[in-house]
Image: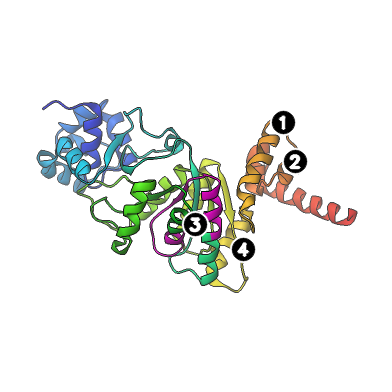
Amino acid sequence: MSWTQRQYLIAFNMMPGIGGRRLLAIKEHFGGLDRAWHASQDKLLEVPGIGPKTADLFGSLRSSISPAKEEKWAEALGARILTLHDDSYPQYLKRLAVPPPVLYVRGQLPLEPGIAVVGTRKPSRIGIAQAKQFSSYLAAKAVPVISGLARGIDYASHAETLESGGVTIAVLGSNLAKLYPPEHRVLAQAIGEKGALVTEFSSRCPTVPGNFPRRNRIIAGLSKGVLVVQAGRNSGALHTADWALDLGIDVWAIPGEISDPLRHGTHGLIKQGAALVTDPEELLSKDTSRAKVGSSANPSLAELYDAGYGPNEIAATLARSIKEVLAEISLLQVERGLRM
């Protein structure tokens, strides 16, 4: 049996327990995926992070896996498989520390990253209205809206973008044949026709809770900024924001009533340096101001602050401690308040 490198990637991606990080470890240990695929279970156990369970599953399932059949499975669903070896693999996803080695795509991915609009699965009426307002604005500006096809804010964002004639990308926590949640199947069909459905999960992958944190990193990777509309303390949307911060891209949060538990997460983001937004225009106008600051070789703290940078971003840009930055921002605010 002789496969291409992309076929080995597809095959490994179909193996339970082998994600991007473990795949990197396997490739580094064996010096190539072809040698790793034919290795004994004992040799696999020598790879850091590979335990007996994963090695046993690999040994028992290896003979039944066919990359060619997997590609036919995807084609039957109107999708295609992209791997890191393909020229058509989106370059902006490679910003992630560990890009998904394999993607299943139904539809057309945008040439440039979009803006993610995410939030709680159980939003209030106001939260839904805000998700629609911001998504409609982005659609009118031809900015792709990225979200996770979940109930609540995600659904509202996708649906409103389509209604407004825009492009939206849904990143799935399931494989393409077993869409989750199942009641969003009609919406998913429309998204695949006007934008794209994206997942890293193969035909053999069940829908389990651990899929969704992995989905969230792809949402961030497809985006140039993440807007958290409404989120509680433990909302998965906060994980997407964390991935965005790791990438160094914008994070915005919409504020609300301080006693509202559905705003605790968004308020926490604002305290950590996310930009507070109340108008959709702020999502794009901030990009312009940042470009001006970025053209300066040595921007000052005041310039960065005025451009909308959060404390964490200012600290990283100026290579200063967050404590120093927060103290100087406080002094700046006091000084400016006295001048008014």
What kind of element bears circle 2?
A: helix
Determine which of the numbered discs, if any, sits on residue 255 in the image: 4
Mark 2 vs mark 1, CA separation in Å:
10 Å
Residue located beneath label 3 in the image: 238
Mark 3 vs mark 4, CA separation in Å:
14 Å
Q: Earlier in the sequence, mark 4 or mark 1?
A: 4
Taking 159 as reference, is 223 above or below it? above
Mark 2 vs mark 3, CA separation in Å:
28 Å
Instruction: Identify residue type, mark 2.
Output: Glu
| Residue at the (25%, 26%) spot, across then down | 32
What x and y, as percent, mark residue 305?
Answer: 72, 46
Does residue 242 show up? Answer: yes
In the image, residue 146 lies in the stretch drawn in magenta: yes
Q: Earlier in the sequence, mark 3 or mark 4?
A: 3
Please indicate whether residue 180 sits to the left or right of residue 223 in the image. left
Mark 4 vs mark 1, CA separation in Å:
31 Å
Mark 4 vs mark 2, CA separation in Å:
24 Å
The nearer-to-camera label among 1 and 3 is 1
Does residue 46 show up? Answer: no
Determine which of the numbered discs, if any, sits on residue 303 in the image: 2
Write down the region rendered in magenta. 133-157
What kind of element bears circle 1?
A: loop
What x and y, as percent, mark residue 137?
Answer: 56, 53
